[in-house]
Amino acid sequence: MALTRALGAFVAGLDRRTIPAEAFRIARMGLIDCVGVMIAGRDDDAPQILRRTLLPTGAPTGGEATLYFSDLRAPAPEAAWINGTAAHVLDFDDVSLRGHPSTVLVPAIMAEAEALGSSGTDILTAYVAGYEVWAELIRRERGMLHSKGWHPTGVLGAIGAAAACARLHGLDAERATMAIALGASQSAGLMANFGTMTKPFHAGRSAHSGLMAARLAKAGFTASADAIEHPQGFLSAVSQHGEVDRESAATIGHQFRILTEGLSIKKFPACYCTHRAIDGALELVRGNSFGADDVAKVEVHISDRFATILRNAKPQTGLEAKFSMQFAMAASVIAGRVGLPELTDAFVRRPDVQALMTKVQVLPNQDYDPESPSGSRFDKVVVTLKDGRVIDGPEIRRARGHATIPLSDGELFEKFRACLEVGGEVARAESLFDRLLALDTIQARQIAAAA
């Protein structure tokens, strides 16, 4: 069976009873984390500008779906767009499949699930459907989409969200195929826009695109049934060097990639390319007595691919600082952490932060990790002090929160609580967290009603 049709058949035939409990657990973890960072990011300029533009007369009280778990509502497509932008604006959302799957899948699924009156189990099943389609596409690309200037979250997210919403609607194989093909024609997102409001816009737009693709396919809208594998189709169009597998049979459905790839939950609200080095820097700070004034030089060993993504050597805003290894190291030394309070314009522009950033040297390498080819086998931080001492940091191979060293439920709740505190909703952190943990026993509208 041709690839696009195979993806559609998988989505249409996915039975919740065949999904392992562990896959549901991972999906639920991604959903909980995404809701937390969405609430934390909801008052940021990007989602608020988008909300005012999309809903110029105000958010209707009778809309299909809630906006960022508040008392505001909107039509489901607009809710997915705004919520997806809010969920990605802090760059605090989870990581997998060379991108940020939950920040696209969750807003699309939750908005449409409210509109349809879906169950919590329907939501989790749709998440797995979207994740697995995303994973099948990643498997076929040998190169790195980042290296061609594509933002994988925007490029792959529209297809994943289309698959997820097609499953939520219960589309048959033919119409699910159309939804996936239509999602592929809406793939977009440029790395040149990293460090601006447009990066989170990529996630929100993909959530909206996928939701609309499923709705249009359900209504009879057509697309090419070979849009993914055609020589002028999605895989060829976005591939870095054309080293892409368009021919082999789909492996989707043979095993659940969500079990092997999992999700990595971020501990820091910055580009994931900084996280291993932050872990290393914080370990150096905790284990040695030195401050910013003592530092002569900070050397950071990372892959050349990570170095390319971290484009801002002299950031002036919180958004720019999310893509700056220089800032990550300065915040680690000066604040002893890299959290939401540090990722603000005021902190970034502090004279001591700006001064220490000039002492950070990024030393890229091509010693790639075979299990994560964008990164090196390990990242490492070395600090040279003005008195001549050299403090050699540990080799950090996986950041804390990575799928192989996951956060506990307690640690996940602490992040969730901190996010709701930033969003002004800390009083209901525990009750909302508990409802989301029990998602498979309740309905989508029950979550919204209790919000």
Image (cartoon, grey):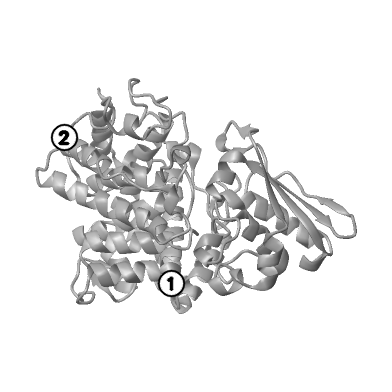
Q: Secondary structure at mark 2?
A: helix
Q: Position of residue 281 (x, y in %)?
A: 72, 56
Q: Position of residue 182 (x, y in %)?
A: 21, 41
Q: Within the image, what quadrant is residue 357 found in?
A: bottom right
Q: Within the image, what quadrant is residue 149 found in?
A: top left
Q: Name the residue beneath numbered marker 2.
A: 174
Say which mark, if any, is on residue 59: none
Say which mark, if any, is on residue 431: 1
User: Could one spot residue 67 in this view of the protein?
Assistant: no
User: Could one spot residue 413 in this view of the protein?
Assistant: yes
Horizontal side of 105 relative to 283 (left or right) equals left
Q: Amino acid at mark 1?
A: Ser
- Picture residue at 24% right of the left edge, 35% below the top: 8
- Picture residue at 40% right of the left edge, 37% below the top: 135
Q: Within the image, what quadrant is residue 336 found in?
A: bottom right
- Picture residue at 62% right of the left edge, 40% below the top: 303
Q: Amino acid at mark 2?
A: Glu
Q: Position of residue 109 (x, y in %)?
A: 30, 54
Q: Position of residue 221 (x, y in %)?
A: 11, 43
